[in-house]
Structures are given as structure tokens and as C-alpha cells.
């Protein structure tokens, strides 16, 4: 078995990615400069896996990962055999990562244990598309990846919200205003709703059984700020007192 490990160039690539994003709207020249450095570091870190797509530097996408499986401990995430994210605990989101267009091998291990992988799966990075990738325990107790395309566009001074159902013990759901109308009907496990455009506000919602419309859980207040696109992930809770949890993420 080939040994997988840390790589300085890949962490350098992450630093250049952050700098490129920082200057994206304030200094286009620095944005391009640091993005070029980001790609160069990626090629050094993953020389045997990066294809000719890296030469077409306009074609890149972004990904980030979310640990959505309460049954699993903290994990390490490898991309093409290189450890990219360390000690990722349940209900946490990694930094985003810009990669050239192409297919990538994802392997996930329990932190510090590289005997058996919890997940071994390929993903597709698409041009100018941002994907949030969650992993959830499957029937055979391995993790499976689920990808959700992000839509960062928001009308000025507005916000928007969608829901993603990742609670394996809950049925299909209706998401409704507390003691009010249904806003997001028929949300099935591993599916996402469409975005709903809103004015910035705090919303008070509840989850109901989609078949009976019976209340299952009262959701915590969700504060939505302007110029952000939000996803509310419905997760299995970590205790009997809180069997349902919510993770609110934004771009």
C-alpha cells in the first residue's frame, strides 16, 4: 500500500487560494497572481494526478466538506492521496478549496487510523461551480459522499435560504413556519430544497412529517444576514435530549 501523508505544497496552495479570494474584488491583478501561485503549488503537490486542465487556468471549481455523520468520530480527508484536512469533527465545515476541473479521488479515515478507509469515492470538480460535499453513514456503516451545488448569487440587500435533509432517522419533511404555513414541502432524505429569497431576518421554523404534517421538531431560530446564501442542514442530534440538530452554513 502506498503511504499517504502531509504535503507542504498543498498547504501552500491553500494559503495562495485564500489570498486569491481576498483580492478577488479589490485588486484583480493580485487575485490573478495568487491564483497562478495556487495552481503551481497544486501541480507540485499532486504532479501525477493533475491533468492538462491545470493549463486551462480559467477552468476551476471550488469544494468544501461537511462532516454530517454523528456516528463517526473526527476524520482526516485525503484528495488524490494527500491529506488535505485533519481532525474534522462532526458538524464542522472545512475551508473551501479551489481545484482545476477534473475527477479527484477522495479517501476518508478516522483521524490517526489509516488501516481501513471509511470512504473511498471519486468526485467531479466542474468549471466555475462551487460544491458543498457532505458525508453520511450508509447502511454498511461506511461513509458516502453527497454533493450539493451552491448558488452564491443574491439580490442586493436580500438573503436566501434552502434546506438539506441529512437526518437518516427522520421521514420526508415539511419545513414550516412555527404554527403556520409550510414553506418547504416534501423534503426527502439526502435531498435539498430550492432557495427561497428573503429579506434579512430571523426565521422561526419547525419540521413536520410530510405525510401527516405532524410536528416532529422545533428548529432553533435562524438569523439570516443580507447578501448571503444560506443552507440549513438537518442533522441527527448527538443526544436523546436533542435528537435533531441544525447546521447553518453560508457562502
Image (cartoon, rainbow, N blue to C red):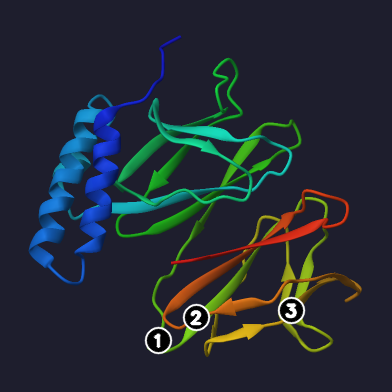
Give SS at disc 2: loop
Q: Earlier in the sequence, mark 2 or mark 3?
A: 3
Q: Which residue position holds label 1?
A: 155
**Position of the C terminus by quadrant:** bottom left
Q: Earlier in the sequence, mark 2 or mark 1?
A: 1
In this view, which residue lies farthest toward the left? 29
Viewer-side residue, 117 vs 250: 250
Give SS at disc 1: loop
* Mark 2 touches mark 3? (CB < 8 Å): no
Q: Which residue position holds label 3?
A: 205
In the image, residue 204 sits, relative to residue 12, either above or below, namely: below
Q: Give the residue at x 55% y 79%.
A: 224
Between marks 2 and 1 in the image, the one whose residue lies nearer the viewer: 2
| Residue 195 showing in the rendered view | no
| Crowding at mark 1 (Cα within 10 Å: few <14, some 14-19, many 20+) | some
Q: Write down the quadrant of residue 137 in the picture.
A: top right
Residue 135 image label: none
Q: Give the residue at x 73% y 32%.
A: 141
Q: On the picture, is 4 further left or further right than 34?
A: right
| Crowding at mark 3 (Cα within 10 Å: few <14, some 14-19, many 20+) | many
Q: Which residue position holds label 2?
A: 225
Residue 142 at x, y = what percent? 67, 31
Between marks 3 and 1 in the image, the one whose residue lies nearer the viewer: 3
The Cα–Cα distance between marks 2 and 3, rounded to whole angstroms, is: 17 Å
Amino acid at each position: 500500500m502506498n503511504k499517504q501523508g502531509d504535503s507542504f505544497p498543498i498547504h501552500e496552495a491553500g494559503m495562495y487560494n485564500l489570498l486569491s479570494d481576498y483580492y478577488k474584488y479589490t485588486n484583480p491583478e493580485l487575485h490573478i497572481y495568487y491564483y497562478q501561485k495556487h495552481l503551481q503549488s497544486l501541480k507540485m503537490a499532486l504532479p501525477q494526478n493533475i491533468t492538462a486542465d491545470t493549463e486551462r487556468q480559467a477552468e476551476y471549481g471550488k469544494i468544501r466538506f461537511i462532516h454530517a455523520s454523528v456516528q463517526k468520530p473526527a476524520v482526516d480527508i485525503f484528495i488524490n492521496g494527500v491529506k488535505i484536512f485533519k481532525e474534522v469533527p462532526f458538524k464542522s465545515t472545512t475551508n473551501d478549496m479551489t481545484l482545476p476541473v477534473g475527477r479527484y479521488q477522495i479517501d476518508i479515515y478516522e483521524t490517526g487510523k489509516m488501516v481501513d478507509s471509511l470512504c473511498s469515492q471519486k468526485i467531479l470538480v466542474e468549471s466555475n461551480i462551487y460544491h458543498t460535499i457532505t458525508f453520511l453513514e450508509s447502511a454498511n456503516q461506511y461513509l458516502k459522499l453527497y454533493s450539493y451545488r451552491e448558488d452564491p448569487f443574491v439580490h442586493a440587500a436580500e438573503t436566501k435560504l434552502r434546506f438539506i435533509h441529512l437526518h437518516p432517522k427522520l421521514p420526508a419533511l415539511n419545513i414550516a413556519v412555527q404554527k403556520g404555513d409550510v414553506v418547504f414541502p416534501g423534503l426527502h432524505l439526502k435531498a435539498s430544497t430550492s432557495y427561497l429569497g428573503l429579506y434579512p431576518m430571523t426565521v422561526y421554523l419547525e419540521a413536520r412529517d410530510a405525510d401527516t404534517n405532524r410536528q416532529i421538531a422545533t428548529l432553533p431560530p435562524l438569523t439570516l444576514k443580507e447578501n448571503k446564501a444560506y443552507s440549513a442542514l438537518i442533522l441527527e442530534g448527538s443526544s436523546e435530549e436533542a435528537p435533531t440538530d441544525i447546521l447553518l452554513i453560508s457562502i
